[in-house]
Image: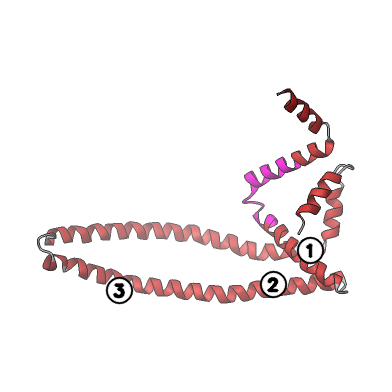
Amino acid sequence: MNYFVDWLKVQLSNPQIVFLALFLLVTALVISYAGAILAPVIAGIVIAYVLEGLVGRFTVLGLPRPVAVGFVYIGFIVFVISTLLVVFPVLYNQLTQMVQQIPALLYRGQLELIQLPEHYPELFSVEQVREMIATIRTQLTDYGQQLVSISLSGAASIITWMIYLILLPILIFFFVKDKKKILNYLIRFLPKDRELTAQIWNDVDI
């Protein structure tokens, strides 16, 4: 126990370790309590970090950074738009076909239920089948009401995603374009002794 206390005192006496621990704690709390609000910002930072790797490779090849940023950003936008144009029509067609097949499937199911007393009279009576059909219709009505409520909430989700689709590319562009300005601004809030933080960042930076 004394060994642990002594070790803890030594660690807490190091301002770099204290700063790093507080930074990780504050980051975790912000993500936990404001993650939904900051989702576009967090996603923008992650995507900008990935794109920055491509920008760095182009600058190594001799391209000026503004040209490399523009080239990578345009390529990213083209890739996203192409993916959406390919994926959305496929999903829409699949959903349309599924919705169109629902009445036919329900009709076939009803016919199969009606024929049960004929094929298995010792197991099913006509009255039992009628009760089963009535129960199924009631459940389908409940499912329809739930689907309407989900559709209403889905409309709000669609609006949110549309806002993300507009806001996120703007954030990504400025995160990549103004990387040095943003980092220089944030460095002002870091302690002067930040060798440990820099070492950890270099270790995790891919």
* Chain part drawn in magenta: 23-42
In reply to whether residue 160 is colored magenta, the answer given is: no
Q: Could you tell me which quadrant the C terminus lies in?
A: bottom right
Determine the main secondary structure of the stretch shown in magenta: helix
Relative depth, front residue between 75 and 6: 6
Q: Residue at x 50, y 60 (%)?
A: 154
In the drawing, what numbered circle is on residue 104? Answer: 3
Residue shown at 69%/72% (left/top)? 77
* Residue 129 drawn above or below residue 73: above
Q: CA distance from mark 1 to mark 2?
A: 14 Å
- Residue 189 visible from this viewpoint: no
**Helix, strand or loop status at disc 3:** helix
Which mark is on residue 176?
1
Q: Which comes sooner in the sequence, label 1 or label 3?
A: 3
Cα distance in 3D space between marks 1 and 3:
53 Å
Q: Position of residue 45 (x, y in %)?
A: 72, 58
Residue occupied by mark 2: 77
- Residue 8 is situated, as x and y percent measured from the top left of the image, at 76, 30
Q: Are marks 1 and 3 in contact (CB under 8 Å)?
A: no
Mark number displayed over residue 7: none
Image quarter for residue 10? top right
Residue 152 or 127: which is nearer the viewer?
Answer: 127
- C-beta proximity under 8 Å, tags 1 and 2: no
Q: Residue at x 78, y 64 (%)?
A: 52
Instruction: Report the amino acid beneath label 2.
Output: Ile
Whichever of labels 3 and 2 marks the residue nearer the N terminus, that label is 2
Give the residue type at disc 1. Val
Of the 4 image quadrants, the one containing the N terminus is: top right
